Amino acid sequence: MKKLIFFFSSLSIFLFASCNLEPSSSNYTPVVTITSFALNGQTSTTYDTLTVGTVLTLYGYVSGVTNTLDSVRISNDTSYSTLTFTDLSSIDTNVLSNSKTDISKGFFYLHGFNIYSMPFTLVYIPTQVKKDGKITFQVYSNSSYSPLITTFPTPSKN
């Protein structure tokens, strides 16, 4: 039960209701959605705490809803974990070839490309014990409710 509560509370961090204060407004808060995840290659629906060395693969997307995305940064603290991006083929080639994009730092520059959403697949591996480990998402769009800055908890143990 504890694992289920942890999973749904973690998921609720990412599932924000968009703000639409005016009927004709196109100002929405950017959204991060985790569609699924796998632990050591096995699809999972919940986890409590990662063991050091466990491979957590997250599948999801960031969205500006009706607003275009300006930039996305997905990061972690490299002193206790690694984070890599896989399946870059689903990301627009203009973004990947842009000199402002730095995949090694988890930074994707999307300004000027009229991109409303960006899928991602990332692999997170805790290398040390960290009770408050996390992945940080920063999503900037042309909305007045931007940016969205949120975290996905990734506590780890031996």
Image (spheres, rainbow, N blue to C red):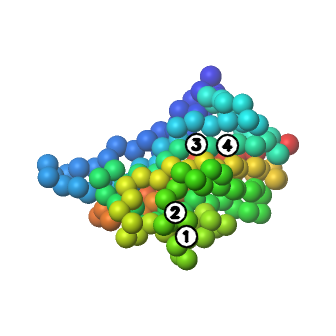
42 shown above or below 30: above
* Residue 118 image offset from top left, x and y in percent: 47, 53
Say which element carries label 4: strand
Labelled disc at residue 97: 1
Q: Residues within 10 Å of mark 1 (few under 14, many from 20)?
A: few
Q: Which residue is mark 2?
A: 93
Is residue 81 toward the left or the right of residue 99 in the image?
right
| Spatial separation of the CA atoms under disc 2 and disc 4 | 23 Å
* Mark 3 or mark 2, whichever is nearer to me: 2
Is residue 130 toward the left or the right of residue 58 in the image?
right
| Spatial separation of the CA atoms under disc 1 and disc 3 | 22 Å
Say which element carries label 2: helix
Q: Residues within 10 Å of mark 2 (few under 14, many from 20)?
A: few
Q: Are marks 3 and 4 in contact (CB under 8 Å)?
A: yes
Q: Which residue is mark 3?
A: 59
Q: Are marks 1 and 2 in contact (CB under 8 Å)?
A: yes
| Spatial separation of the CA atoms under disc 1 and disc 4 | 24 Å
| Spatial separation of the CA atoms under disc 3 and disc 2 | 19 Å
Which residue is depicted at the point 53% across and 32% down?
8
Which residue is depicted at the point 62% across and 65% down?
103
| Spatial separation of the CA atoms under disc 3 and disc 4 | 7 Å
Which residue is depicted at the point 62% across and 22% down?
1
